[in-house]
Image (spheres, helix red, strand yellow):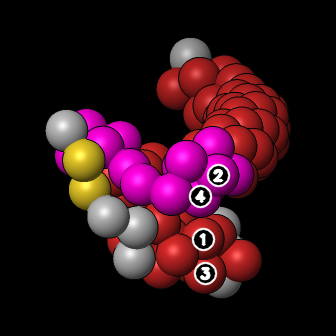
Amino acid sequence: MKELLLETYTIILPILLGYIVWLLKQQKKSRDANSKGTMLLLRVQLIEYHEEWSGRGYITKHGIENFIEMYDAYHALGGNGMVTHLLEEVQELPIKN
């Protein structure tokens, strides 16, 4: 009986572990795709905000806080330096309430 259990474990354990590894890889692909999509949406929104506020010539206190928080999230997801330049320009705008 012990030999049968040992053989069963010897066969089933690698299959089970392989399946778990496959599941984890699928989850990683999904998370990576979600992160990239989120990063792209943040970039689009940051560019739009930059254009809007630069066109006005000023930014609101609430607006700059949102921009910085969105920038931090974008940067944490691996965003590039192009948006850093936009942040610097937005930070130079006068703040109006």
Instruction: Tell me whether circle 1 and circle 4 mark residues in contact (CB < 8 Å).
Output: no
Which-is-in-front pick, marks 1 and 4? 4
Q: Which residue is mark 4?
A: 54
Q: Is residue 55 left or right of residue 44?
A: left
Give the residues drawn in magenta, as a range: 50-63
Instruction: Tell me whether circle 3 and circle 1 mark residues in contact (CB < 8 Å).
Output: yes
Q: Please, is residue 84 above or below residue 62 in the view?
A: below
Element carrying mark 3: helix
- The amino acid type found where label 2 is placed reads Gly
Element carrying mark 1: helix
Q: Which residue is mark 1?
A: 86
- Position of the C terminus, as image quadrant, is top left
Q: Please, is residue 89 above or below residue 30 in the view?
A: below
Which of the numbered marks, if any, corresponds to residue 55? 2
Q: Which residue is at a point 60% across and 71% down the rendered structure image?
A: 86
Q: Earlier in the sequence, mark 1 or mark 2?
A: 2
Which of the numbered marks, if any, corresponds to residue 85? 3
Query: Is residue 57 highlighted in magenta?
Result: yes
